[in-house]
Image: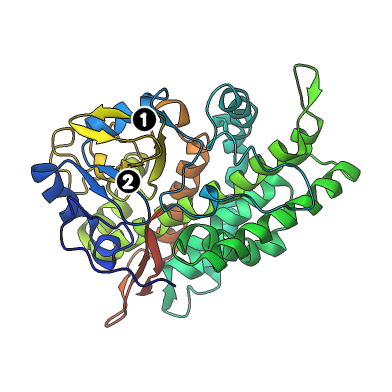
Amino acid sequence: MTHIAAVEDWATDFDVLDPRYVTDPFSIWDDLRQTCPIAHTDRRKSSWLPTRYEDVTAIAHDIEHFSSLKVAVIPGDEDEDPENFDGPNLEYGLPPISSDPPLHTWTRRLLLPWFSHKRVDGYVPLTRDLCRRLVDGFAESGHADAAADYAQQIPVRVIAHILGVSPDLSDTFTSWVRDVLEFADDAERRQRGAEGLLNYFLGQLEESRQHPGDDLLSELLTTKVEGEPLDDGIVLGMAALALIAGVDTTWSAIGSSLWHLATHPDDRKRLVAEPELMPTAVEELLRAYSPVTMAREVTADIEYAGCPMKAGDKVLMNFPAANRDPEVFEHPDEVQLDRAHNRHVAFGSGIHRCAGSNLARMELQVALEEWLARIPDFSLAGGAEVTWAGGQVRGPRICPVVF
């Protein structure tokens, strides 16, 4: 892995992989909003980092000047020539998240029914049973890793069910997704994860053709758009997206929420005593610990808010910082479980707002409900170190707790 020098000036040389940023980005955002609300760096590639709600949402809605064809926060494989896989054409990327209209429009429309309120309600029993079985595995031991033993085990199995793939491969899927998202400076790990996912789904396409089921992958293989079946490359990209986007993001939200409750006993006790607060609390925890930062690519030279952005530059859609903007949220660094007005953008803004937001909310709520039902009193293990991942998706990867 390439050694990267420490940051000395966050306004002109920021690094979202700097350990200080991963551990505590909040104070850095606070300083930047006052001194340089849209920071810049030439590390890895010319990139911009807006920290205000107004700027993040404005850029998210300006699809003419800010393209979604390259959404990785850290430039890597997407900026190089793709590998020649023995399979479908991969030029489509991961639609709809890494596409612009018109491809974005109709691929998103195909996904939405699978994540509607009605469909998500149907996934609740599966999710609740899964959470209970996970808690059963450690409830009597008096300790657990809230991240690895619980949070990271839930979304991958729910998404496997939706895709119609084997939940027995959950640990393998998790490893591939982490390789793709969490090791941005390690090209070998990124490639290993990407190839693992792609090669698996190449085989799964044929399996689903021969033995179709009531699942997303099977439906995509039989869908026609304007009378033509979907290109295998589009099906492959959409399936990979469902797994990548639906796993690390949600387990990060669950893990961050459990970390918060472990370190804020008053909030934990209140949520146990007032379970009717859970839906509002979920929104507030999503706001305070938004896990995802996406990227946009500048399509042509443009000056935005005095910043001379060049074609090919990246703009990091800093949704987590937008959700801590004091101009929009009163006392933004306080978690208020009953916050009534909460226009957070944890799921993004504009045409690329997360299609799976209903599913993520459900998984987070059920995960917290089932944990607190069995383990209402818990805290961080004494002397234990919580390990956070950052960059594209921020959340705890190791979070030892005792109860």
| On screen, residue 121 above or below 125 | above
Callout 2 environment at 10 Å: few (<14), some (14 to 19), or many (20+)?
A: many
Residue kind at label 1, given as amino acid type: Ala
Label disc, if present, on residue 111 of the rendered structure: none
Which quadrant of the structure image shows residue 191?
Answer: bottom right
Which of the two discs, 1 and 2, labels the residue nearer the N terminus? Answer: 2
| Residue 369, position as x, y percentages in the image | 43, 53
Residue found at the far top of this picture: 226
Q: Quadrant of the N terminus?
A: bottom left
Residue at which label 2 appears: 47
| On screen, residue 192 above or below 282 | below
* Residue shown at 46% from the left, 51% from the top: 249
Residue at which label 1 appears: 60
The answer to whether 263 appears left or right of 247 in the picture is left
| Residue 40, position as x, y percentages in the image | 24, 47
* Residue shown at 85% from the left, 41% from the top: 212
Residue kind at label 2, given as amino acid type: Ser
Whole-angstrom CA distance, mark 1 to mark 2, is 15 Å
Mark 2 and mark 1 in contact (Cβ < 8 Å)?
Answer: no
Residue found at the far left of this picture: 34
Q: Quadrant of the C terminus?
A: bottom left
| Residue 275, position as x, y percentages in the image | 35, 47
The answer to which of 366 and 99 lies nearer the viewer is 99
Q: How is the image coloured?
A: rainbow
* Residue 163 visible within the image: yes
